[in-house]
Image (tube, rainbow, N blue to C red):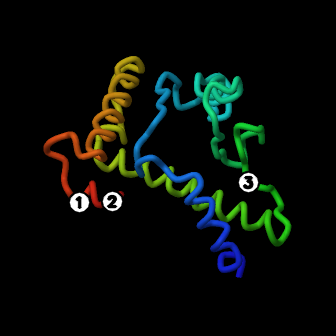
Amino acid sequence: TTSQNCNSYVSFIALSRSYVMPHVITNVDAKWPGSVHDSRIYRESTLSNRLECGEIDGFLLGEKGYPCKPTLMTPYPEPEPGPQQCFNVAHCRTRARVEMTIGLLKTRFQCLRHLRVTPEKACDIIVACVVLHNGGIGGSVVGFSPIMRKAR
């Protein structure tokens, strides 16, 4: 199967682009309302600008709705068998890790599921939750469940 053929490629990607610490959120931009498309948020973000001007070395993975750029890699729309298919498998697995991190954040901070506050206050709450989440992942916040730390 494709998955079996791509195992070595996926392992290589995971090792060469591993997180410094799994499930840590390194960039949050909480100023946009939910109605704004993700690609616009990315296009106008500080992170996008810093990547494109070379201030930050690397690239991001985006879903198929994003434009493919040198700093933003998207899956092949119709991958050919072989390397393209393997890339898409690796891309999907890595993106799943991102979604898992967002899920952990929302599990840890149930208030994020339904914020009933002003947009300005919502931005502050989201950023505060991310900071506390990262502290809990690193083990520096007292009171976080060891079970959540094991999820790494």
Q: Which residue is mark 3?
A: 75
Tell which of 65 and 60 is nearer to you.
60
Residue drawn at (55%, 59%) of the image: 15
Quadrant in the picture for residue 3: bottom right
Q: Position of residue 113 (x, y in %)?
A: 36, 42
Q: Position of residue 139 (x, y in %)?
A: 23, 46
Q: Is residue 132 visible?
A: yes
Quadrant in the picture for residue 127: top left
Residue drawn at (67%, 34%) of the image: 39
Task: Tell me if 88 is positioned left or right of 24 in this view.
Answer: right
Q: Which residue is mark 2?
A: 151
Q: Give the spatial CA distance, label 2 vs label 3.
A: 27 Å
Do the numbered discs 1 and 2 sit on residues whose CB atoms are within 8 Å? yes
Give the mark, 1 or 3, whose residue is nearer the N terminus. 3
Say which quadrant the N terminus sits in. bottom right
Helix, strand or loop for disc 1: helix
In the rendered structure, find residue 147 and report the number of the disc placed on it. 1
Amino acid of disc 2: Ala
Q: Residues within 10 Å of mark 2 (few under 14, many from 20)?
A: few
Task: Tell me if 16 is positioned left or right of 5 in this view.
Answer: left
- Above-or-below relation of 109 to 80: above
Helix, strand or loop for disc 3: loop
Amino acid of disc 1: Ile
